[in-house]
Image (cartoon, rainbow, N blue to C red):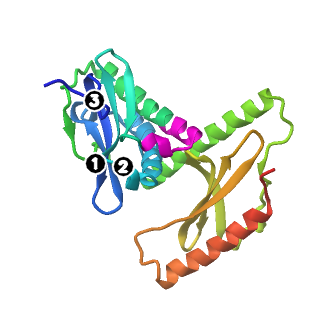
Amino acid sequence: MNLKNIAGNDASIFLFRFELRGGNGIDFVLNEAIAADIDQDIDDKIKPLVHACCETLLRYRHLSVGNTIMDGYILATGEFEVMLSKGLGLHFALDEKARLFQDAKNIADLLTEVMDRGSIVPEKGKQRKPPPFKHTTNPEKVKKGLEQLGEAKSLQAELQWIAEGQTIRPGLKPLRPDDLPPGVTASRGYDHRGHCYVFEHRKYGELGRIVMIKAGEQKMLMQADLYLGQENQESTTEKKKKEIFEKVVTTISARFDGL
């Protein structure tokens, strides 16, 4: 039986897939032979990329026509191909889909490096269920990796803006620490929709994120996402977090220049 990807194209090696699971989650399923040979340095680079892809795919999981929402294979031609569930790509903004696919390609490149290091010839289609790596996930390390990805994307955008001869860049005006509610800190995040800022409270933890989304040549939109953890959203703590984040959003809105 020939190996085929989600689109039905002939493939030679299965690399990974993102699979819907019960509740409101997504599993990252990896070729078992590759997973067994991943070194820590590659593991540290892959996990933030996987995390970012999962966050994006979660926003569209209700539109997936199958259990596999996205997969990545090396085709019989030797080329890498990433595919979304049938018709799902039509619901994406073009920039968001391009960034999602680029990170899927980055994951594939890292997995190819694993194969090159160990001269692995993975069994066709061999897969395993999560957790995909032999290394324990470190949330702080993943967070730092996402911050680094966000910083790199921001720098790339700034350089492009300068190269295009633009003197004013729409978006968020500079913030000072005392502009935010007491106990709140902001850091760079990473989101396929656009430039992302993550807000945390020293007592209550992550509050939410604000994403600046490009909408035209010189126009930006601002989207705020409240962080929804595992706690009861009606609890006193969660209500307090929501209250604080609403103050953050009000502050940011006043300093936002979408043009």
Give the magenta part as a residue range: 88-100
Q: Name the residue under label 2.
A: 64
Q: Residue at x 42, y 78 (%)?
A: 232
Q: Mark 1 or mark 3: which comes first in sequence?
A: 3
Give the quarter of the image for residue 139.
Answer: bottom left
The 10 Å Cα crowd at callout 1, few under 14, some 14 to 19, many 20 or more, is few
Give the quarter of the image for residue 152.
Answer: top right
Q: Name the residue under label 3.
A: 8
Q: Mark 3 or mark 2: which comes first in sequence?
A: 3
Q: Residue at x 42, y 75 (%)?
A: 231
- For mark 2, give the secondary structure: loop
Marks 3,2: beta carbons within 8 A: no
Q: Name the residue under label 1.
A: 67
Q: In this view, does 134 lie above or below 116?
A: below
Q: Mark 1 and mark 2: span between their CA atoms?
A: 7 Å
The count of marks equals 3
- For mark 3, give the secondary structure: loop
The 10 Å Cα crowd at callout 2, few under 14, some 14 to 19, many 20 or more, is some
| Amino acid bearing label 3 | Gly
Marks 1,2: beta carbons within 8 A: yes
Q: Is residue 222 above or below residue 123?
A: below
Q: Report the magenta stretch's main SS.
A: helix
Q: Mark 1 and mark 3: span between their CA atoms?
A: 15 Å
Residue 59, given in percent of the width and then of the height, sits at: 46, 54
Q: Mark 3 and mark 2: span between their CA atoms?
A: 16 Å
Q: Which numbered circle lies on residue 32? A: none
Left or right of residue 198, residue 34 in this image: left
Q: Residue at x 63, y 42 (%)?
A: 151
Residue 147, given in percent of the width and then of the height, sits at: 57, 47
Residue 69, given in percent of the width and then of the height, sits at: 35, 44
Left or right of residue 168, residue 210 in this image: left
